[in-house]
Image (cartoon, grey):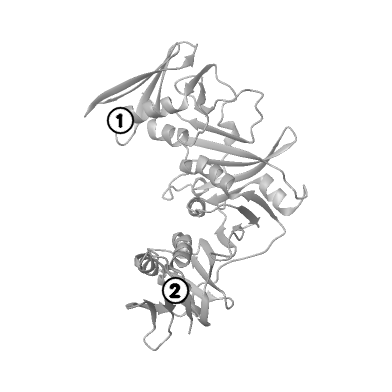
Protein backbone atom coordinates (compact mmCIF):
# COMPACT_ATOMS: atom_id res chain seq x y z
CA UNK A 1 0.00 0.00 0.00
CA UNK A 2 1.50 3.30 -1.11
CA UNK A 3 0.59 6.12 1.25
CA UNK A 4 2.20 9.55 1.41
CA UNK A 5 1.67 13.23 2.23
CA UNK A 6 2.68 15.92 -0.22
CA UNK A 7 2.30 19.68 -0.76
CA UNK A 8 -0.19 20.59 -3.46
CA UNK A 9 2.17 22.89 -5.38
CA UNK A 10 4.91 20.25 -5.50
CA UNK A 11 2.54 17.48 -6.57
CA UNK A 12 0.74 19.61 -9.16
CA UNK A 13 4.01 20.72 -10.78
CA UNK A 14 5.16 17.12 -11.08
CA UNK A 15 1.83 15.96 -12.50
CA UNK A 16 1.86 18.83 -15.00
CA UNK A 17 5.36 17.87 -16.15
CA UNK A 18 4.34 14.33 -17.16
CA UNK A 19 0.88 15.04 -18.63
CA UNK A 20 2.08 15.24 -22.22
CA UNK A 21 3.54 11.73 -22.21
CA UNK A 22 0.39 9.90 -21.13
CA UNK A 23 -1.71 8.68 -24.04
CA UNK A 24 -5.22 10.14 -24.02
CA UNK A 25 -6.79 8.17 -26.89
CA UNK A 26 -4.65 5.06 -27.22
CA UNK A 27 -6.01 1.53 -27.50
CA UNK A 28 -3.84 0.42 -24.57
CA UNK A 29 -5.72 1.91 -21.61
CA UNK A 30 -2.90 1.58 -19.10
CA UNK A 31 -0.79 4.19 -20.90
CA UNK A 32 -3.50 6.70 -19.98
CA UNK A 33 -2.27 6.15 -16.43
CA UNK A 34 0.70 7.38 -14.45
CA UNK A 35 2.97 5.03 -12.54
CA UNK A 36 3.54 6.40 -9.03
CA UNK A 37 6.01 4.75 -6.65
CA UNK A 38 8.27 5.63 -3.77
CA UNK A 39 12.04 5.45 -4.27
CA UNK A 40 13.02 6.18 -0.66
CA UNK A 41 11.47 7.78 2.41
CA UNK A 42 11.61 11.28 0.93
CA UNK A 43 10.63 11.06 -2.74
CA UNK A 44 8.01 9.60 -5.02
CA UNK A 45 8.74 8.85 -8.66
CA UNK A 46 6.10 9.61 -11.31
CA UNK A 47 6.40 8.07 -14.78
CA UNK A 48 4.27 8.46 -17.91
CA UNK A 49 4.58 6.98 -21.40
CA UNK A 50 2.68 6.62 -24.66
CA UNK A 51 5.22 4.00 -25.83
CA UNK A 52 6.92 6.57 -28.08
CA UNK A 53 7.92 9.20 -25.53
CA UNK A 54 8.27 8.93 -21.75
CA UNK A 55 8.71 11.42 -18.91
CA UNK A 56 10.04 10.61 -15.44
CA UNK A 57 10.05 13.10 -12.59
CA UNK A 58 10.40 13.09 -8.81
CA UNK A 59 8.56 14.86 -5.98
CA UNK A 60 9.54 15.32 -2.36
CA UNK A 61 6.96 13.72 -0.06
CA UNK A 62 6.52 12.26 3.39
CA UNK A 63 6.28 8.52 2.77
CA UNK A 64 3.92 6.76 5.19
CA UNK A 65 4.09 3.34 3.55
CA UNK A 66 5.84 2.04 0.44
CA UNK A 67 4.47 0.66 -2.81
CA UNK A 68 3.62 1.45 -6.42
CA UNK A 69 0.38 1.91 -8.29
CA UNK A 70 -1.04 3.39 -11.52
CA UNK A 71 -3.81 5.98 -11.73
CA UNK A 72 -5.44 7.92 -14.56
CA UNK A 73 -3.18 10.82 -15.52
CA UNK A 74 -5.80 13.35 -16.56
CA UNK A 75 -8.13 12.68 -13.63
CA UNK A 76 -5.56 12.90 -10.84
CA UNK A 77 -4.16 16.10 -12.33
CA UNK A 78 -7.65 17.65 -12.50
CA UNK A 79 -8.39 16.62 -8.93
CA UNK A 80 -5.18 17.98 -7.42
CA UNK A 81 -5.55 21.19 -9.41
CA UNK A 82 -8.93 21.87 -7.78
CA UNK A 83 -7.73 21.50 -4.20
CA UNK A 84 -7.44 24.80 -2.23
CA UNK A 85 -4.79 27.29 -3.34
CA UNK A 86 -3.91 28.52 0.16
CA UNK A 87 -0.47 27.77 1.54
CA UNK A 88 -0.63 24.44 3.34
CA UNK A 89 1.44 24.14 6.51
CA UNK A 90 3.71 21.14 6.94
CA UNK A 91 1.36 19.68 9.53
CA UNK A 92 -1.62 20.07 7.21
CA UNK A 93 -0.33 18.83 3.86
CA UNK A 94 -2.54 17.65 1.07
CA UNK A 95 -2.80 14.00 2.05
CA UNK A 96 -2.69 11.40 -0.67
CA UNK A 97 -3.58 7.85 0.33
CA UNK A 98 -2.98 5.06 -2.17
CA UNK A 99 -4.86 2.08 -0.83
CA UNK A 100 -4.84 -1.17 -2.77
CA UNK A 101 -7.98 -3.05 -1.87
CA UNK A 102 -10.21 -5.67 -3.41
CA UNK A 103 -12.15 -3.09 -5.38
CA UNK A 104 -8.93 -1.70 -6.91
CA UNK A 105 -9.48 1.86 -5.77
CA UNK A 106 -7.07 4.60 -4.74
CA UNK A 107 -8.13 7.27 -2.26
CA UNK A 108 -7.07 10.91 -2.71
CA UNK A 109 -8.14 13.12 0.16
CA UNK A 110 -7.67 16.55 1.69
CA UNK A 111 -9.52 17.40 4.91
CA UNK A 112 -13.15 16.41 4.25
CA UNK A 113 -12.80 16.12 0.48
CA UNK A 114 -12.34 12.54 -0.75
CA UNK A 115 -11.89 11.14 -4.25
CA UNK A 116 -11.63 7.47 -5.17
CA UNK A 117 -10.19 6.37 -8.50
CA UNK A 118 -9.90 2.95 -10.09
CA UNK A 119 -6.40 1.68 -10.81
CA UNK A 120 -4.55 -0.85 -12.91
CA UNK A 121 -1.90 -3.07 -11.27
CA UNK A 122 1.57 -1.54 -11.54
CA UNK A 123 2.98 -4.84 -12.78
CA UNK A 124 1.05 -4.30 -16.04
CA UNK A 125 2.62 -0.89 -16.71
CA UNK A 126 5.00 -0.81 -19.72
CA UNK A 127 8.72 -0.81 -18.98
CA UNK A 128 10.15 2.62 -19.73
CA UNK A 129 13.40 2.62 -21.64
CA UNK A 130 16.17 4.34 -19.71
CA UNK A 131 19.91 4.25 -20.16
CA UNK A 132 23.14 5.79 -19.02
CA UNK A 133 25.80 6.72 -21.51
CA UNK A 134 29.13 8.44 -21.72
CA UNK A 135 27.82 9.84 -24.99
CA UNK A 136 26.29 13.04 -23.62
CA UNK A 137 26.72 16.80 -23.46
CA UNK A 138 25.27 19.73 -21.52
CA UNK A 139 23.36 22.76 -22.76
CA UNK A 140 21.51 25.56 -20.95
CA UNK A 141 17.75 24.92 -20.88
CA UNK A 142 16.90 28.48 -21.91
CA UNK A 143 19.13 28.19 -24.98
CA UNK A 144 17.72 24.77 -25.87
CA UNK A 145 14.15 26.08 -25.66
CA UNK A 146 15.07 29.06 -27.85
CA UNK A 147 16.61 26.79 -30.47
CA UNK A 148 13.59 24.47 -30.48
CA UNK A 149 11.17 27.41 -30.61
CA UNK A 150 13.01 28.83 -33.63
CA UNK A 151 12.23 25.81 -35.83
CA UNK A 152 9.56 23.46 -34.43
CA UNK A 153 6.67 25.18 -36.23
CA UNK A 154 8.17 24.12 -39.57
CA UNK A 155 7.81 20.38 -38.90
CA UNK A 156 5.27 18.45 -40.95
CA UNK A 157 2.00 17.37 -39.37
CA UNK A 158 1.93 13.86 -37.95
CA UNK A 159 -0.63 12.89 -40.57
CA UNK A 160 2.03 13.48 -43.22
CA UNK A 161 3.29 10.27 -44.81
CA UNK A 162 6.88 11.52 -44.69
CA UNK A 163 7.68 10.64 -41.09
CA UNK A 164 11.23 11.98 -41.39
CA UNK A 165 9.73 15.47 -41.70
CA UNK A 166 7.67 15.22 -38.49
CA UNK A 167 10.67 15.84 -36.24
CA UNK A 168 13.55 18.26 -35.81
CA UNK A 169 16.97 17.40 -37.20
CA UNK A 170 19.82 17.86 -34.68
CA UNK A 171 23.31 17.93 -36.21
CA UNK A 172 26.77 19.10 -35.16
CA UNK A 173 28.47 21.31 -37.74
CA UNK A 174 31.88 22.94 -37.79
CA UNK A 175 32.51 26.39 -39.23
CA UNK A 176 35.69 28.42 -38.95
CA UNK A 177 37.06 25.85 -36.49
CA UNK A 178 34.05 26.30 -34.20
CA UNK A 179 31.38 23.73 -33.34
CA UNK A 180 27.69 24.58 -33.68
CA UNK A 181 24.63 22.61 -32.63
CA UNK A 182 22.24 23.06 -35.55
CA UNK A 183 18.49 22.37 -35.57
CA UNK A 184 16.56 22.12 -38.85
CA UNK A 185 12.87 21.52 -39.59
CA UNK A 186 10.89 21.46 -42.83
CA UNK A 187 7.47 20.40 -44.07
CA UNK A 188 8.38 20.67 -47.74
CA UNK A 189 6.90 24.17 -48.10
CA UNK A 190 9.12 26.02 -45.64
CA UNK A 191 12.38 25.39 -43.82
CA UNK A 192 13.71 26.81 -40.57
CA UNK A 193 17.31 26.51 -39.42
CA UNK A 194 18.92 27.70 -36.20
CA UNK A 195 22.28 27.03 -34.64
CA UNK A 196 24.22 27.83 -31.49
CA UNK A 197 27.95 27.90 -30.90
CA UNK A 198 28.96 25.28 -28.34
CA UNK A 199 32.20 24.28 -26.70
CA UNK A 200 32.19 20.56 -27.35
CA UNK A 201 34.14 18.99 -24.49
CA UNK A 202 34.09 15.39 -25.69
CA UNK A 203 36.52 13.57 -27.90
CA UNK A 204 36.19 14.23 -31.60
CA UNK A 205 35.65 10.55 -32.33
CA UNK A 206 33.43 9.52 -29.41
CA UNK A 207 29.96 8.06 -29.93
CA UNK A 208 27.83 11.16 -29.53
CA UNK A 209 30.16 13.24 -31.71
CA UNK A 210 29.82 10.75 -34.55
CA UNK A 211 26.05 10.47 -34.07
CA UNK A 212 25.60 14.23 -34.12
CA UNK A 213 27.93 14.72 -37.08
CA UNK A 214 25.65 12.34 -39.00
CA UNK A 215 22.53 13.92 -37.50
CA UNK A 216 19.50 12.58 -35.64
CA UNK A 217 15.76 13.30 -36.01
CA UNK A 218 13.95 13.93 -32.72
CA UNK A 219 10.12 13.74 -32.67
CA UNK A 220 8.17 16.98 -32.39
CA UNK A 221 6.13 15.67 -29.45
CA UNK A 222 8.99 15.37 -26.96
CA UNK A 223 10.35 18.77 -27.98
CA UNK A 224 6.92 20.34 -27.49
CA UNK A 225 6.89 19.01 -23.92
CA UNK A 226 10.32 20.51 -23.27
CA UNK A 227 9.04 23.92 -24.40
CA UNK A 228 6.39 23.75 -21.67
CA UNK A 229 8.97 23.54 -18.88
CA UNK A 230 8.98 26.54 -16.58
CA UNK A 231 12.47 25.97 -15.22
CA UNK A 232 16.00 27.23 -15.50
CA UNK A 233 19.19 25.23 -15.41
CA UNK A 234 21.26 22.78 -17.39
CA UNK A 235 20.09 19.95 -19.64
CA UNK A 236 22.20 16.84 -20.14
CA UNK A 237 21.49 15.21 -23.52
CA UNK A 238 22.22 11.49 -23.86
CA UNK A 239 22.01 9.76 -27.24
CA UNK A 240 22.33 6.24 -28.59
CA UNK A 241 21.44 4.79 -31.98
CA UNK A 242 17.70 4.61 -31.29
CA UNK A 243 16.88 6.92 -28.39
CA UNK A 244 17.52 10.29 -26.80
CA UNK A 245 17.21 11.44 -23.19
CA UNK A 246 16.97 15.04 -22.05
CA UNK A 247 17.86 15.04 -18.36
CA UNK A 248 17.14 18.23 -16.45
CA UNK A 249 19.47 18.52 -13.53
CA UNK A 250 18.15 18.96 -10.00
CA UNK A 251 17.19 22.56 -9.15
CA UNK A 252 15.46 22.21 -5.78
CA UNK A 253 15.46 19.82 -2.85
CA UNK A 254 11.73 20.36 -2.50
CA UNK A 255 10.33 19.99 -5.99
CA UNK A 256 12.30 17.33 -7.82
CA UNK A 257 15.40 15.36 -8.53
CA UNK A 258 16.54 15.05 -12.13
CA UNK A 259 13.61 14.98 -14.57
CA UNK A 260 14.01 12.88 -17.72
CA UNK A 261 12.34 13.29 -21.11
CA UNK A 262 12.90 10.12 -23.14
CA UNK A 263 12.06 9.48 -26.79
CA UNK A 264 12.70 7.14 -29.66
CA UNK A 265 14.50 8.72 -32.59
CA UNK A 266 12.75 8.92 -35.95
CA UNK A 267 14.19 6.50 -38.48
CA UNK A 268 15.04 7.67 -41.95
CA UNK A 269 17.23 10.23 -43.64
CA UNK A 270 16.61 13.94 -43.31
CA UNK A 271 16.41 15.83 -46.64
CA UNK A 272 19.53 17.48 -48.02
CA UNK A 273 18.43 20.83 -46.62
CA UNK A 274 21.59 22.74 -47.55
CA UNK A 275 20.74 22.51 -51.25
CA UNK A 276 17.39 24.19 -50.55
CA UNK A 277 18.89 27.31 -48.98
CA UNK A 278 19.96 29.83 -51.66
CA UNK A 279 23.55 30.93 -51.23
CA UNK A 280 22.76 34.42 -52.46
CA UNK A 281 19.99 36.55 -53.91
CA UNK A 282 20.30 39.69 -55.96
CA UNK A 283 16.99 41.15 -54.71
CA UNK A 284 17.68 42.04 -51.09
CA UNK A 285 15.97 44.22 -48.51
CA UNK A 286 16.22 45.24 -44.85
CA UNK A 287 12.90 45.55 -42.99
CA UNK A 288 12.01 46.54 -39.44
CA UNK A 289 11.00 43.27 -37.76
CA UNK A 290 8.06 44.59 -35.74
CA UNK A 291 6.61 46.64 -38.62
CA UNK A 292 6.96 43.68 -41.00
CA UNK A 293 5.18 41.34 -38.61
CA UNK A 294 2.39 43.78 -37.76
CA UNK A 295 1.77 44.62 -41.41
CA UNK A 296 1.44 40.97 -42.42
CA UNK A 297 -0.72 40.21 -39.38
CA UNK A 298 -3.11 43.04 -40.22
CA UNK A 299 -3.43 42.35 -43.95
CA UNK A 300 -3.77 38.58 -43.47
CA UNK A 301 -7.06 39.13 -41.63
CA UNK A 302 -8.69 39.06 -45.08
CA UNK A 303 -6.48 36.35 -46.58
CA UNK A 304 -8.12 33.15 -47.81
CA UNK A 305 -8.52 30.73 -44.91
CA UNK A 306 -7.00 27.75 -46.71
CA UNK A 307 -4.05 29.35 -48.47
CA UNK A 308 -3.36 32.33 -46.14
CA UNK A 309 -1.81 33.94 -49.20
CA UNK A 310 -0.50 37.50 -49.29
CA UNK A 311 1.52 39.37 -51.89
CA UNK A 312 4.67 41.33 -51.11
CA UNK A 313 5.37 44.11 -53.59
CA UNK A 314 8.94 45.45 -53.50
CA UNK A 315 9.71 48.86 -54.98
CA UNK A 316 12.47 51.32 -54.11
CA UNK A 317 12.48 51.75 -50.31
CA UNK A 318 8.87 50.58 -50.10
CA UNK A 319 7.02 47.34 -49.38
CA UNK A 320 3.36 46.88 -50.26
CA UNK A 321 1.69 44.04 -48.37
CA UNK A 322 -1.69 43.09 -49.81
CA UNK A 323 -4.24 40.32 -50.19
CA UNK A 324 -7.29 39.84 -52.37
CA UNK A 325 -10.07 37.52 -51.25
CA UNK A 326 -12.79 37.25 -53.89
CA UNK A 327 -15.34 36.13 -51.29
CA UNK A 328 -14.68 38.83 -48.68
CA UNK A 329 -12.66 41.75 -50.00
CA UNK A 330 -9.10 43.00 -50.03
CA UNK A 331 -6.55 44.67 -47.75
CA UNK A 332 -3.19 46.41 -48.13
CA UNK A 333 -0.53 48.15 -46.08
CA UNK A 334 2.71 49.95 -46.93
CA UNK A 335 5.92 50.22 -44.91
CA UNK A 336 9.26 51.86 -45.59
CA UNK A 337 12.16 49.47 -46.17
CA UNK A 338 15.70 49.48 -47.49
CA UNK A 339 15.39 48.12 -51.06
CA UNK A 340 17.19 49.25 -54.22
CA UNK A 341 16.34 46.53 -56.74
CA UNK A 342 13.89 46.47 -59.61
CA UNK A 343 10.17 46.24 -58.73
CA UNK A 344 9.11 42.69 -57.90
CA UNK A 345 6.06 40.96 -56.45
CA UNK A 346 6.07 37.60 -54.69
CA UNK A 347 3.18 35.56 -53.24
CA UNK A 348 3.71 33.82 -49.87
CA UNK A 349 1.85 32.07 -47.05
CA UNK A 350 1.31 34.71 -44.33
CA UNK A 351 1.13 32.15 -41.50
CA UNK A 352 4.52 30.72 -42.40
CA UNK A 353 6.14 34.16 -42.41
CA UNK A 354 4.62 35.18 -39.07
CA UNK A 355 5.56 31.87 -37.43
CA UNK A 356 9.17 32.63 -38.25
CA UNK A 357 9.34 36.38 -37.62
CA UNK A 358 7.72 36.22 -34.18
CA UNK A 359 10.79 34.40 -32.84
CA UNK A 360 13.30 36.98 -34.08
CA UNK A 361 14.67 39.27 -31.37
CA UNK A 362 16.73 41.53 -33.66
CA UNK A 363 15.25 44.89 -34.67
CA UNK A 364 15.53 44.22 -38.40
CA UNK A 365 15.41 41.29 -40.81
CA UNK A 366 17.06 40.81 -44.18
CA UNK A 367 15.20 39.23 -47.10
CA UNK A 368 16.56 37.92 -50.38
CA UNK A 369 15.23 36.15 -53.45
CA UNK A 370 15.89 35.88 -57.16
CA UNK A 371 12.55 35.27 -58.90
CA UNK A 372 8.89 34.83 -58.01
CA UNK A 373 9.38 31.06 -58.29
CA UNK A 374 12.56 30.58 -56.25
CA UNK A 375 12.87 30.36 -52.44
CA UNK A 376 12.32 33.51 -50.40
CA UNK A 377 14.78 33.86 -47.51
CA UNK A 378 14.39 35.75 -44.22
CA UNK A 379 17.09 36.07 -41.57
CA UNK A 380 17.94 38.47 -38.75
CA UNK A 381 19.88 41.46 -40.03
CA UNK A 382 23.34 41.48 -38.47
CA UNK A 383 26.60 43.14 -39.42
CA UNK A 384 28.98 40.94 -41.40
CA UNK A 385 31.63 41.05 -38.68
CA UNK A 386 29.18 40.24 -35.88
CA UNK A 387 30.17 36.72 -34.75
CA UNK A 388 26.91 35.87 -33.01
CA UNK A 389 26.61 32.70 -30.94
CA UNK A 390 23.11 32.04 -32.32
CA UNK A 391 21.97 32.25 -35.94
CA UNK A 392 18.56 31.65 -37.55
CA UNK A 393 17.26 31.52 -41.12
CA UNK A 394 13.88 30.84 -42.72
CA UNK A 395 13.29 29.64 -46.30
CA UNK A 396 9.84 29.82 -47.90
CA UNK A 397 8.59 28.47 -51.22
CA UNK A 398 6.53 31.06 -53.13
CA UNK A 399 2.91 30.37 -54.02
CA UNK A 400 1.82 30.21 -57.63
CA UNK A 401 -0.14 33.08 -59.15
Which x, y percent locates residue 109?
A: 37, 77
Extreme residue in the left direction = 327
* Image label count: 2
Q: Residues within 10 Å of mark 1 (few under 14, many from 20)?
A: many
Pair 2/1: label in front: 2
Query: Does 390 appear above or below 326?
Result: below
Which x, y percent locates residue 366?
A: 52, 23
Which x, y percent locates residue 200?
A: 72, 46
Residue beneath the point at 36% across and 86% down: 103
Question: Would you identify the image quadrant in which residue 236 lies?
Answer: bottom right
Q: CA distance from mark 2 to mark 1?
A: 54 Å
The residue under label 1 is: 303
SS for callout 1: loop
Q: State the residue in front, 387 or 40.
A: 40
Q: Residues within 10 Å of mark 2 (few under 14, many from 20)?
A: some
Q: State the residue in front, 324 or 331.
A: 331
Residue beneath the point at 48% across and 78% down: 4
Residue 113 appears anywhere in the view: yes
Query: Does 285 appear above or below 179?
Result: above
SS for callout 2: loop
Residue 326 appears anywhere in the view: no
- Which mark, by number, is residue 10? none
Query: Does 164 appear above or below 272?
Result: below
Residue beneath the point at 47% across and 10% down: 342
Which x, y percent locates residue 111?
A: 36, 77
Please state, as top left, top right, bottom left or bottom right, where the C terminus lies in the image.
top left
Reading the chain from its start, which is encountered first: label 2 or label 1? 2
Label 2 with label 1: CB-CB less than 8 Å: no
The residue under label 2 is: 93
Amino acid sequence: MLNFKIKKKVFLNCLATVQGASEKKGSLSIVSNLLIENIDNNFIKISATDLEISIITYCSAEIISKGKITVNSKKIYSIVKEFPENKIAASDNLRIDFIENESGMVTISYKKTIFKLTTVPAIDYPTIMDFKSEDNFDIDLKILKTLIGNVIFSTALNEDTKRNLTGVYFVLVNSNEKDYLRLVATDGHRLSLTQFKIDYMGKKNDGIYNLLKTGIIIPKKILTEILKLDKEGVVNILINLNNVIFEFKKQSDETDKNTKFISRLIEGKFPDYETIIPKDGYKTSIINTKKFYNSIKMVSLLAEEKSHSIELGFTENNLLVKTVNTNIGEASDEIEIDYKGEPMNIKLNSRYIMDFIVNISEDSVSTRFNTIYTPFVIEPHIEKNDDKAMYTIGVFMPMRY
